[in-house]
Amino acid sequence: MANTEADSSLMKKIVSLCKRRGFLFQSSEIYGGLNGFWDYGPLGVELKRNIKRAWWQDMVTGHDDLNVVENAPSVFSMTGIDSTIIMHPQIWKCSGHYDLFHDYMVDCKQSKRRYRHDQIVGRWVEAKGQKIFVTTLASEACESEIESKALKFFKLRAKNKEDLVYSSEVIDLISVEETTSVLAPEAKALDTLTSPREFNLMFKTTVGALGGEDDVAFLRPETAQGIFVNFKNVIDSTRFRLPLGIAQIGKSFRNEITPRNFTFRSREFEQMEIEFFCHPDDSAKWYSYWRDRRLSWYHTMGISEKSLIMREHHADELAHYSIGTADIEYAFPFLPEGEYGELEGVAHRGDFDLRSHMEGKLDEKSNPLEVQLNEKGKPKYRGSGKDLQYRDDLTNEKYTPHVIEPSAGADRATLAFLCEAYYEDEAPDENGKMQLRTVMRFHPRIAPIKAAVFPLVKKDEFQSKTARDIYLALKREFNVFYDETAAIGKRYRRQDEAGTPYCITVDGDSVTDQSVTIRERDSLEQIRIPIDSVVSEIRNRILG
Ligand code: ATP
């Protein structure tokens, strides 16, 4: 489907605001940048940190472990860990990443561009007695793009577009067997794509000074494995009983073939993952609990219902051990209308991971309980050999827990919150004239700056001192901003663009009524409140 003009221009505006206001910068920009890597600027670091903090607070530290929380099957516990990025290489053999974590890439010999094979789509087009397959990238898969490429190739003018005869709808390149007639996305001639080659997405490194093949290690492609291999440590070192969720936030690395769409597909990114361990008999209930809970978390943090969907995977998309996986997807503006991009996956992983780390990697096609043997009769991929089962001290039952995994990306969530927050409306300028304003409508909990404090007149000693005192009092609890430059309307607008929910202005009346004005970012409502209640007012408004 066509990418609407409005959406791609919206994305351009968001990207430009991110750079202009210091949310996101291209990594290593002064050296020309490094594809797939992004730096967070002063506003971006606060936004992303607030999102991670809200997630940790809502999922882990703020969790009520004494009562059955809403819609949960029973009482449960939550805790966290922080494991290393580089771990024993055997972990990646047993998890399956060493053998299975790959994409297929194709190179274009003419444009020197590299693509993920599954991202190229196209249409068969015929003109001047020749039939060719015109391709483009999936997310830009608009008919007009293919049409203009075909017109160029056949040297036809736009007014002669009727001369193009389409013999297919848009289809995937993967389904095209005849490669000599393929026009690659950025090529001018036919048949420039190499055959697809397998490419493991894990970054390799070496541990120690010698750096031989035996010292090869990998940067983790997900944080989840650090939780599985520490499951026993957590159980043994605490008094937690199952059901128990163990959470982790941390960097992950994937050598993506085609990083794209701003931070959506990066090579270095952060994940917020929970491995929720429970009794196998209850796992289906917990799966549905976590699916619903994670979806509603995004809503409570300000993502509208219409921008978010839950997509349940079809049976043929599921791994053999999984009885369900659902993706929470967001309508990113860079996607064609009606399409959504993954924000988070919630997967029922059965006992696959713990068993793999006990017994070795299990063959996908065989009975997952059977360990595969090599020609010498040894298990193919040796697990840790450790007993990672759980013994219930009340019932004395011993079992390998099932796992539900809500796995979210902190950078994708940040991008979704940025896209969702971007809003244009009209507000009065300093002369009271209605003017277009750009406002980032972040939920107050994640807003990078919670409040800005202004003296209306900089040179007024009372106003300036009172504003500074309020600023310092708020600063003990929140990230706040002080500004005494420019006209008040301009100061408001600067804060609107940064997404600051509240502006506090000390004015000429403040000396007599000991009050200040609080202006709310979205409604533009202004109310007077006593100076000595500013901190509690802001606290109540932010924490709800
Ligand atoms: P995709 O299909 O988009 O590659 P995935 O299904 O491989 O994603 P998971 O392995 O389930 O992703 O990872 C969990 C979450 O981590 C994703 O939902 C996403 O938010 C985040 N994530 C994964 N890969 C990337 C990436 N390259 N850049 C940014 N975030 C990512």
Image (cartoon, rainbow, N blue to C red):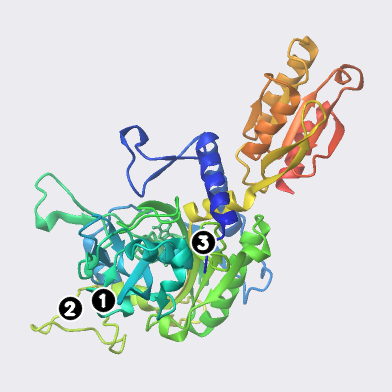
- Callout 2 touching callout 1 (CB < 8 Å): yes
- Callout 3 touching callout 2 (CB < 8 Å): no
* Residue 27 spot, x, y in % from top left: 37, 40
Tell me which numbered mark, 3 or 2, is placed earlier along the sequence.
3
Judge the density around disc 1: few (<14), some (14-19), many (≥20) Cα neighbours within 10 Å.
many
Q: Is residue 494 above or below residue 439?
A: above
Residue 463, disc: none
Of marks 1 and 3, the one in the foreground: 3
Of marks 3 and 2, the one in the foreground: 3
Q: Disc 3 to disc 2, how far (Cα)?
A: 42 Å
Q: Disc 2 to disc 1, how far (Cα)?
A: 7 Å
Which residue corresponds to the image point at 30% horizontal and 89% vertical from the top-left?
Answer: 367
User: What amino acid does circle 3 point to?
Assistant: Leu
Q: Is residue 479 above or below residue 51?
A: above
* Quarter, ligand 1: bottom left
SS type, badge 2: loop
Residue linked to disc 3:
335
| The CB of the residue at mark 2 lies under 8 Å from ligand 1 | no
Asked if residue 182 lies left or right of residue 272, the reply is left
Residue 361, disc: 1
Q: Disc 1 to disc 3, how far (Cα)?
A: 37 Å
Q: Is any atom of residue 441 visible in this view?
A: no
User: What amino acid does circle 1 point to?
Assistant: Lys
Asked if residue 540 lies left or right of residue 265, the reply is right
Query: Which residue lies most toward the bottom here?
Result: 367
Which of the two residues, 48 or 153, is positioned nearer the viewer here? 153
Q: Is any atom of residue 496 visible in this view?
A: yes
Residue linked to disc 2:
380
* Residue 347 spot, x, y in % from top left: 47, 73
Judge the density around disc 2: few (<14), some (14-19), many (≥20) Cα neighbours within 10 Å.
some
